Image (cartoon, grey):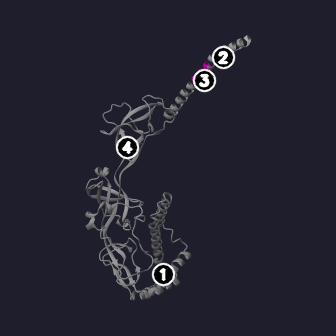
Amino acid sequence: MAGTKVKTIQKKNDERKNKPARRKKGGIARLIGILLAVFYLFALWNWVFHDGIETSILHTGLLEIKVPSEGVLVRSETPIIAQSDGIVIPKADNGQRVPNKGTIAVLVDKGSSGIISSIESMEREIIRRIVEESTDNPYNDPVLREKVQKEVNRLTNAAVSGNLRYIGEIRAVLERLLYQRNKAVFEQQDSRLYLQKEKSELEQLKKTLDQNAVTIKADYSGLVLWSNEETHEKYTPENIASLTTGDLTYDEKKHAKAGIKSTAVNKSFPVEKDKVFAKLINNEKSWFVCVVDNKYAQRLTAGKKIDLRIDNIDIDIPCTIESIQPAGDKTKVVLAFDSMIEQTIHLRHVRADLIISSISGLKVPVRSLTNRNYVDNTADIIVVRFNRADIKRVKILEEQDSYAIIEAASGVNEVDPVRVFDIYVVNPRNIEQGQVIE
């Protein structure tokens, strides 16, 4: 019994001796864990704020200062109405300028449809023979190729962006180009007697048709738009002042096609009495009435000349700002233009950029500028000189979207100011003067 007690006491003493050893081992493990955590955090800090430093080279670039807008195109339009039921044969291309009292089209009765079909069939056959039998390719026209390529590029851009609202317009332009080229092929001189005979027969058919035709002439010199769209009394020059922001706001669903429905210009088509089938447009002046956000209003002044760039039309139209007026949370702007009107006659509701000016200089991302002062519009940019960070004060000349044009700030005594081809830090986070930049 006594021996058992001795063994129990000895066992307890042994356990007491071992306990400090366990604590000692646990303390070492915790210390190692803390050291590893500190090392990991240091490595993470270094990776995020140092190894991830993005640099680039300062280059000169062009920055367009533009204001986004949405609105309507307004012009002086005269609807052309059918005097009776019948078939219209166009005598002018879509967008073509006709002189005062010039012929726009002829209107024949529906009983003449057979003669019209024969004329169109004979024209196609003559053009086909000329193309097949000609040693030179009559379509090898650099001007035509350039115009077709432009429409193909628009089609490609529409497919890439998924914006297909201008597909109908592109198709109409391509059809018009093909028609104009076929017309030129048909009218060219040809020495082949059998073709001259067929052309004479064709002319005789046309004279027979014209005997019962009513000629439709222009009341004034203007542009022809083949369209069955009813005249919108709202969108006239006289009503510009009364247009509201609701009239000018672009609705993606409502204005998805963003244009005026045009009829074919290379074929005859049926019309009903008292229905609009075309329009004559005064090409002396047109207007773009739009709304812009109030934050851009201070950039616009009446009388200023700017450029208008309508979405998906690869041209800049010179305009003059006629008026600017507040319209609640928007600003209403009226612009006038007297050139390139034929490029816009098929459009009504559109989105467009108002190109105020362009400026060139050192172009950098806005995110590369730090410590910005909005009072004098200055900021810091970090350049890399001899692998070390060198903070330079610069003046922000203009800013658009996510880019800015800068120059060395005036009044700063810089021995070595920022200059073209400097290496600068694009993402200047937690970088100090003189810091090593690998």
Secondary element under disc 2, as helix, strand or loop, is helix
> Looking at numbered disc 1 in the image, what kind of residue is underneath it?
Glu
Residue 351 is situated, as x and y percent measured from the top left of the image, at: 38, 59
Check whether the beta carbons of the residues at disc 3 and disc 2 lie within 8 A of each other: no
Q: Report the predominant secondary structure element of the magenta stretch.
A: helix
Check whether the beta carbons of the residues at disc 3 and disc 1 lie within 8 A of each other: no
Secondary element under disc 1, as helix, strand or loop, is helix
> In which quadrant of the rendered image does the N terminus lie?
top right
Check whether the beta carbons of the residues at disc 2 and disc 4 lie within 8 A of each other: no
**Residue at mark 2:** 15
Secondary element under disc 3, as helix, strand or loop, is helix
**Residue at mark 4:** 405
Residue 367 is situated, as x and y percent measured from the top left of the image, at: 42, 41
**Which is more N-terminal, label 2 or label 1?**
2
> Looking at numbered disc 3 in the image, what kind of residue is underneath it?
Ala
**Residue at mark 3:** 29
**Residue at mark 1:** 120
The residue mark sitting in front, 3 or 1, is: 3
**Which is more N-terminal, label 1 or label 3?**
3
**Which is more N-terminal, label 4 or label 2?**
2
Secondary element under disc 4, as helix, strand or loop, is strand
Using a 10 Å C-alpha cutoff, classify the residue at mark 2 as few (fewer than 14 neighbours), some (14 to 19) or many (20 or more): few
Q: Which residues are magenta?
A: 23-31
The residue mark sitting in front, 2 or 4, is: 2
